[in-house]
Amino acid sequence: MNRDRLADRVASLRPSINLTAAAAPPAAGRPNPLLFVEGEPADFDTPEFVKAAAIQALRDGWTKYGPTGGLPELKDCIRQKLSQENGLVYGADEVLVTVGAKQAIFNALMALCNPGDEVLIPAPYWTSYPEQVRLVGATPRILLTQRPGWRLTPDILADVLSPKSRVLILNNPSNPTGVVYQREELVGFAAVAARADLWVIADEIYEKYVYDGRAFTAFASLGPEMQQRTVTVNGVSKAFAMTGWRLGYAAGPASLIRAMTLVQGHSTSCANVMTQRATMAALRGGQESVQTMVAAFQQRRDLMVNGLNRIGGIHCPRPEGALYVFPDVSRLLEGGSVGAPLRTSVELARYLLEEAGVAVVPGEAFGAERAMRMVIAVPPEQIEEALVRMESCLQRRIAR
Ligand code: PLP
């Protein structure tokens, strides 16, 4: 029947595994699962002054449609942020306000890619990249990096180039691996991008989450030529604990931003206007709240890395940034275990959920088998409890 037919573009679309794992009900007689799934600060709320700005915005009547590309006064705040914090100068027509960074990436892909174009995605990758690329009719080209470091190199990038290569998506700091690229590494990617005439979507949503005193370098800041071929993507979800507000932005050359704005005009019209007013307050309000979170998450990262490395069969590198640990679980999936074999990280995640009451995301969701992702932005008591549960559950399996 014709009514049963759905568009081809959704046939191969995979659901977000993150959300699937979080929604799983606890097994009968088991405690509620401890969740290490959602990429957001679990126990830090949006700062009060940002909430107050939203309430004031409603009182002041910011309840109507706004300009498609964003409120000019918010765009000014974003331009100021990019200039002061990243050394990037953009004009008013080079910034677009979107419904989260996710929509900024989608609009960019819509505006840049024709069917047949290849979008280069280093793996492990954020789950939505390949799916968004498929949705716009382009082809994801996955770049395999090596465990345990999972670093992209200019050679890996150069090796996959073809005449169809169109866009590189570079997530720095990286979800799920926690890699933070140093300036020299970015310069190496930039040279390949320039040689191959690639666009770069620089997803810098985790910019603030760099640990151990590392520096963050915005890709577009490598020079005017690079800025001309880069779409800088960022937002307030992670930095201001505002994931539910849905506010992101893109900055890039005016012709591309114009095209992305056209796409937005026929999809979401504009980002939520009250949220835009609140975001102005967030961006003007300083870095205190995010600095508190960064300090807390660095400690939680260490708690988690040290604890996981004490569990036989898990090898957990120390992430340099972002909100996740991404341990190698190969040994848990190999022979030598007692009980039913766990063959994949999906089976391991299911086992941990059912037997330990700990919800993690299997590596498969990020294009990396034999790994799993856990969020570090959860309260330390919860991390400690999870480590105890996982250890007692997993040590029974390992033949030492
Ligand atoms: N990019 C990466 C790498 C992410 O991990 C996420 C969210 O988890 C996003 C973009 C989306 O951010 P937003 O909430 O601003 O849409």
Image: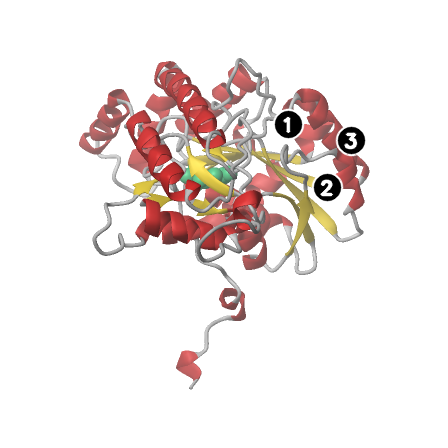
Label 3 sits on what residue type? Ala
Disc 1 crowd rating (10 Å Cα; few below 14, some 14-19, many 20+) is many
Q: Secondary structure at mark 3?
A: helix
Q: Of the two numbered discs 3 and 2 on the same chain, state the one appearing first in sequence.
A: 3
Q: State the residue in front, 13 or 265.
A: 13
Q: Of the two numbered discs 1 and 2 on the same chain, state the one appearing first in sequence.
A: 2
Q: Secondary structure at mark 2?
A: loop
* Colour mapping used in the image: secondary structure
Q: Quadrant of residue 68?
A: top left
Left or right side of 190 for 357? left
Marks 1 and 3, how far apart in space?
Answer: 13 Å
Left or right side of 143 for 359? left
Q: State the residue in front, 77 or 195.
A: 195
Name the residue beneath numbered marker 3.
191
Q: Of the two numbered discs 1 and 3 on the same chain, state the one appearing first in sequence.
A: 3
Q: State the residue in front, 167 or 179.
A: 179
Instruction: List x then y, in percent, for residue 327.
Output: 52, 37
Label 1 sits on what residue type? Ala
Label 2 sits on what residue type? Leu
Marks 3 and 2, how far apart in space?
Answer: 10 Å
Left or right side of 218 for 222? right
Q: Is residue 364 above or below residue 274?
A: below
Instruction: List x then y, in percent, for residue 169.
Output: 62, 41
Q: Is residue 222 above or below residue 71?
A: above
Observer able to see residue 69: no
Instruction: List x then y, in percent, for residue 125.
Output: 57, 43
Instruction: List x then y, in percent, for residue 325.
Output: 48, 33
Name the residue beneath numbered marker 1.
220
At horizontal 47% and vertical 23% (from top left) the residue drawn is 208
